[in-house]
Image (cartoon, rainbow, N blue to C red):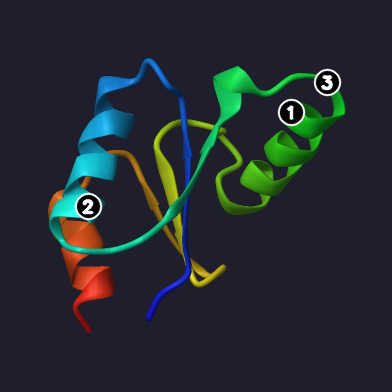
Amino acid sequence: MFELKLFALSTCIWCKKTEKHLTDMGFKYDVVYMDKLAGEERAQAMKELEKFNANRSFPTLVIDGQKVVVGFKPDEIRGALMR
């Protein structure tokens, strides 16, 4: 099984579509809503996000701490998770 972490904004339609896509595929994932964090917690999450996506754009899906899919790209997500 994959370890999936999604960096997202709670108000972002593309983030919601990515979540739905992962759910529809039957995957469990952790989601970090950056806009709901504050202070040190937000700073730490932003630092972690920057390791995977220097532009800090959303959604950013991290697969097993290595593979990264930025944006809502269902085909790319499916390809990465159906290997």
Which residue, given by chain and number where applicable, does mark 3 sit on? 39
Q: Earlier in the sequence, mark 1 or mark 2?
A: 2
Determine the residue positioned at 67% across, 23% down: 37
Q: Nearer the viewer, mark 1 or mark 2?
A: 2
Q: How many marks?
A: 3
- Amino acid tagged 3: Gly
Badge 1 density bin: few <14, some 14–19, many ≥20, Cα 10 Å: some
Determine the residue positioned at 24% across, 59% down: 77
Kind of element beneath mark 1: helix
Query: Residue 14 in the image: x percent, y percent?
Result: 26, 29
Question: Quadrant of the rendered structure where residue 58 is?
Answer: top left
Kind of element beneath mark 3: helix
**In the image, is residue 56 above or below residue 62?**
above
Q: Between marks 1 and 2, how big is the CA–CA gap?
A: 25 Å
Which residue, given by chain and number where applicable, does mark 1 sit on? 42
Badge 3 density bin: few <14, some 14–19, many ≥20, Cα 10 Å: few
**In the image, is residue 42 above or below residue 62?**
above
Which residue, given by chain and number where applicable, does mark 2 sit on? 23
Q: Between marks 3 and 2, how big is the CA–CA gap?
A: 30 Å
Quadrant placement of the N terminus? bottom left
Determine the residue positioned at 63% across, 44% down: 49
- Circles 1, 3 touching at the beta carbon (< 8 Å): yes
In the image, 42: left or right of 10? Answer: right
Kind of element beneath mark 2: helix
Q: Earlier in the sequence, mark 3 or mark 2?
A: 2
Residue 49 vs residue 33, the one in the foreground: 33
- Amino acid tagged 2: Thr
Determine the residue positioned at 22% across, 84% down: 83
- Amino acid tagged 1: Arg
Query: Residue 63 in the image: x percent, y percent?
Result: 44, 66
Q: Between marks 1 and 3, how big is the CA–CA gap?
A: 5 Å
